[in-house]
Image (tube, coloured by chain):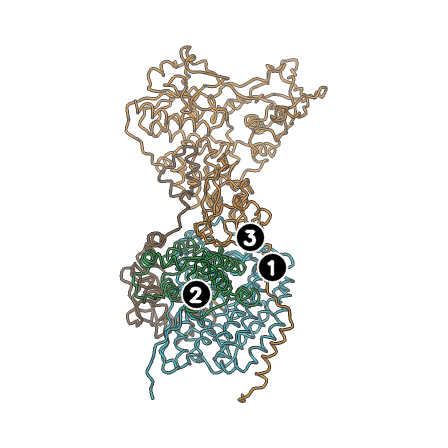
Chain colours: A green, B cyan, C brown, D orange
Amino acid sequence: MINDKNSQKIVDIIQNWARKHSIWVLGYGTGCGAIEIPPTMTSRYDAERLGVRGAATPRQADVLLITGYLTTKTLKRVIRVYEQMQDPKYVIGFGSCTINGGMYYDSYNTIKVLDKYLPVDVYINGCMPRPEAVLSGFGQLQKRIAEGRADGAKQYKENLEWYRANQKKIIPNWVMPEYNW
Amino acid sequence: MREKATTLYLGPQHPGITGNMMVRLKVEGDTIVKATTEVGYLHRAFEKLQERRNWLQAFTLLCRFCVPEPDPVEESYARAVELLEGREVPERAKYIRVLMLELARMGAYMLWYGGQNGSLGLYTMGQWSVGDRNYILDLFEELTGGRVYHMYIWPGGVRRDLPEGFADKVLRTMDYFEKRLKDYDDLMFDNTIFQKRTQGIGIVPKEKAVEWGVVGPILRGCGIKSDIRIDDPYEVYDKLDFVVPTHEGGDIWSRALVRREEVRQSIRIIRQVIEKMPSGEIYNKIPNPHKWALPKGDAYARTEAVRGEVGMYIVSDGSTHPRRTHFRGAAYVHAITLLEKVLVGANVADVSAIMNSLGTCPPEIER
Amino acid sequence: MMKELKEHIIRRVKANFTEAEENNDFTYDRLDFTVKKEVVPSLLLFLKEEMGFKHLSHASCVDWLEEGELELVFILWSPKDKIKVFVRTRLDRDNPVMDNMDNIWPQLHTYEREFREMFGVQFTGLEAPDEFILEDWQGPPPFRRDFDTAAYAEKTFWHRPGREDAQDVRETIANRDGEDIPDFAKKYSR
Amino acid sequence: MSFFDLKGTLKPLTALKQFGKKPHTISYPKVSKEAADRYRGFHYNDLEECIGCGNCSTICQNAAIDMIHLEGIEGKKGDSGLRPRIDHGRCCWCALCVEVCPTGSLSLTKDYNYVSEDPDSFLWTPGKDNPQGKEKISFFSTEETSLNVFQRVPMPELEGKERVKSFAEVVLGYSETEARAEASRCISCGLCTEVCPDHMHIPEYINAIASGNDADAVRIIYDNNPLPEMCGKVCTHRCEDVCAIASRGEAIAIQWLKRYATETAATADITHEIVNPEIREANGKTVGIVGAGPSGLTAAYYLALRGYDVTIYEANAKAGGATMYGIPKYRFPIDSLDKQIDYIQSIGVKINFNTKVGKDISFKEIYDNNDAVFMGVGFPDAWSLGVDGENAEGSIQAFRYLYMINSGEKVDIGDKVIVVGGGNVAIDAARVSRRMGAEVTILYRRRVADMPAAQDEIDGAEEEGVTIVPQAIPIKVIEDEKGHVKAVEYLKAEMVPDERGGRPRPVAIEGSNTIIEATSVMAAIGQKGDYSFLEKEFEDKIKIERGRFIVNEKQQTGDPKVFAGGDAVNRTADAISAIADGFRACKAIDEMLMTK
């Protein structure tokens, strides 16, 4: 075990460097934004150059891409998926709808402000964001990770009660297991 | 010996699923005995929102109904409005619309190439076809200003004329695709794995197909010649020369063959459109959108998309806002009642391939 | 050609359903029949089995709040004759009950589930779970005209703050020049 | 199919040939592909060109656009002073805002890339936050692509040849369909209301017309203008100058739409029925009004509605003032005026005709017998030319000429008329003379473009065959032996730029004397007031400067009980300003008498 503060710092730097270069994105197309993920991942934009690739299950994934609006029904699944993911984990808000409701600001079935329910590390502007913008988003996330500031998951744990209260306001029928990892 | 039935949840978070939806499978061994589709993960209440917007504002929501191929939705809405209002569309706009629709069809089929193969574990195809699809998106970007959301076909015509040199670019892209399609054939249709995983699987019975509401390439994959472009021609399809391919069999394989041929027909149509396109106006301008009221009544217009018949039913009470809009997506039928029937007896491993082949697209189910 | 076809269909339908009101005003391939709701299943079956309208193109529900009615519309397509027929019926908005028709076309099952959830139309004999698209919904059927989605969204979800300094153009100008817009005129302001 | 399918196994391996090819990957962020020439990226707004009409904000179906105050941008006439701010947490880049922007100041650029960790940083004020965006504009609207309807519905008019045959009204008025179509062009921004002296509720009544509720339109119009049909026919319609649509097209025909709405109420009774004015119970206070011109009538109407006992003293046999006697009947038919006067009388306004204050009744008497007095006395006199021979027979004031024609008197003007001046009175006199069968020439000191008359009036005169000779300064009226006008001598002028920055001045060219034959000469170079009716004690209290009453912002003169309005007060000298004065005075009188 390393207890020394300085050596911990060095370990952090190495860890962050490694994490930065292996961003595995959970394959969950929550909204229409998912349509620009295939072009980003395939040959033309080839996100794998940057260490970004898909992961099939939450436990193997690092990044949860919220590709646009979340309906209340999906929000429930997304929360569950997010809590199943293991640290380190990050959330990217994709497009207008995650910021302030976007086109669906007056819809009775979509949430408007994502960061009330999940900690968001990076927002990407656009509706829909182009692959270049998506890659910039990943770039920003990498920068954040490298600087050790990507602490959304920590925030979530620390403020779990606040997040839970907000989540439960939208999801009246809260039957979900607690994932404690 | 009967095995104990287990329930399997496929989705909403599952790499093999075609979008944000869920299929509840009751399986015995790995044979499905009952499948139930559960949707609603993408319900944004578009039609409710459109009632709050005026007839033009409502148009911008349309392309979000089905993101892989938004143009047929725009086309249906535009045509329904024009039908209700009696608005004429300039000839050139009609040609441009057909060009858009066929490019969109190709783009969506490129995604399907990737999805269908991906569902069988053949990932190379996705790298190729989805990568190549970007060339179509580039064309869209140049023509409409957007890669994915075009918001281009609107009531009265289209928004902007072709930019300079656009026709040549389209033709060059078509040349490229013609070459590439041969590669696709080598990789996909001649591939033993693909053949064995698709032939005789996911069969839609021909005698029931029409009654079950099957449309589009899936119906044609049952050997029934049915295509709105020919049966109920819109825009200028009746002036163009193309073939509606059919294949007997009703399985994934014959649907794939239909689609393979349709991409080629799209290229053919696009070449004709470029050649025949007249010059002239592109837009029969609507009045000030804030005060644009449609006469009382209703109209339904439908368009042939890659998934089959998509349509828009609009009702006007004579005001500036729609009384009701109701979108008909092909997946509304294919992904629920049809999928539930086709999946029975299928192998769990084939579910993803069958879903891809039936063109399930959840956003157009729940809207 | 099309005219004769339409007249033929009207004749056949009227012979079997005397009360059906037709609307033949359309210049394109369309014909409307309005019937009482009790007649709808048998008319649909008749059109499908006898008249070649094999394909159910679409079905829709429209809320006519002011008239206290819900309208059901079925759009049928005949692959043989290449013509559309709209079958329309009106239901009492306060007690919208309709017969289940998913034995005619299986896909009507889905439509009926949607109308039940979104408009509150009850289909007697429809066997399906209550929830279709919505989950844990506690409000009224949301697609009814009297459900205000914007007000609901305002109440239920947060909107991001920071935009409170927005001004109304008309008001700004009126305040500047001391114009009093009378209340009865305000509904015409934008 | 055999168990081992050789072709099916080998064919896919041809994919290996791709190894030799150069990848088509765009190695973003190292390499970046430029967005298309029409790309719909971030907004850019030309803050100078923008007029803050807010049409972008109302078309935005996502409620993404706020109109906000920006530092350094002040509102002015034709500019609300507000500018759009886009919430990128709402925007969907549909560019409808661009399509409906009347000025074309709003456009989209090729920029699209913005990522941030701060969700509050997505509010953007285009133009302010991205001044460099101007170079990257990609998606914009032109006159052709814009969704604004820039062409006005043409107004049916009598042809020039037909017009000169009679005094029939030239402008025929919109039909219902035409009016609805024209009204539906309006984007309801309300910029026009600020310029209207009376601040009429223009967007509201135009919207009412567009949605088919003419009765509501009439009610809204009568809210602060009791003579709207007159305005619909003769107003100077400065509102149309600042119309947002006019920045790239033809302004909404505000004046003609008002005319359309008011004409749907065909008689005074129908008007009364539609407007259904709420008349308050008599409050026992009396107000005396001098002059039944637009300002006096307006003050009288709204005071009567508020329960005052109002009496108007009018020197002439008919009410209407300058609009009755100064404006030719082909522009403003007498029936139309009568209808409006009847309506005003029907709510209880008393008018004493043929009662000249100072002669038939003294001002002091009115002053003493009423709780307040309003003077809407106008400019009954005209300036003379001040050249030799101007008193010759056949030399007449244009204003006086119009008065006589409108009173039904016969005037012999011969067959060659010279009108001197470039204002509306000059044009009116010229066009009336054409109708009397004379050949008419207008002499004007400056260029045609400098003429103060309304452009459509000038065009109308030319269509009717009036000759306009610009840059001509009359120096002499030549008489024949009987003392009758024979000709006019004038000098040609050249325009010299004003060194003080004013508009160019005409300077006579020596030796350019030209003589033009004439049977009569009409001077139309301005009117002036006649305040001889005021007794000495009032003349001191009620201050008069440069021929006009001095009033405060409530139209109150030096004597707190006396209010004034109309031409004798304001410099704009048009009916709508007079109406505004009357309306303001009414409110002030009401406030003064009710708080006492």
Q: Nearer the viewer, residue A155 or D433?
A: A155
> To which quarter of the image does residue D224 belong?
top left
Mark nearer the viewer, 3 or 2 = 3
Q: Amino acid at mark 3?
A: Asp
Query: From the viewer's perspective, is residue D243 above or below residue B9?
Result: above
Q: Amino acid at mark 2?
A: Glu
Q: Position of residue C148 (x, y in %)?
A: 34, 54
> To which quarter of the image does residue D480 belong?
top right
**Label 1 marks which chain's residue?**
D
Q: Residue furthest left?
A: C95
Q: Amino acid at mark 1?
A: Val
Mark 3–mark 2 Cα distance, whole angstroms, equals 31 Å
The crowding category of the residue bearing disc 2, from other C-alpha atoms within 10 Å (few below 14, some 14 to 19, many at least 20), is many
Q: Which residue is mark 3?
A: D111
Q: Which residue is mark 1?
A: D31
The crowding category of the residue bearing disc 3, from other C-alpha atoms within 10 Å (few below 14, some 14 to 19, many at least 20), is some
Q: Which residue is mark 2?
A: B364
Kindly state the secondary structure of the residue where label 3 is placed: loop
Query: From the viewer's perspective, is residue C183 above or below residue B195?
Result: above
Mark nearer the viewer, 1 or 3 = 1
Kindly state the secondary structure of the residue where label 2 is placed: helix
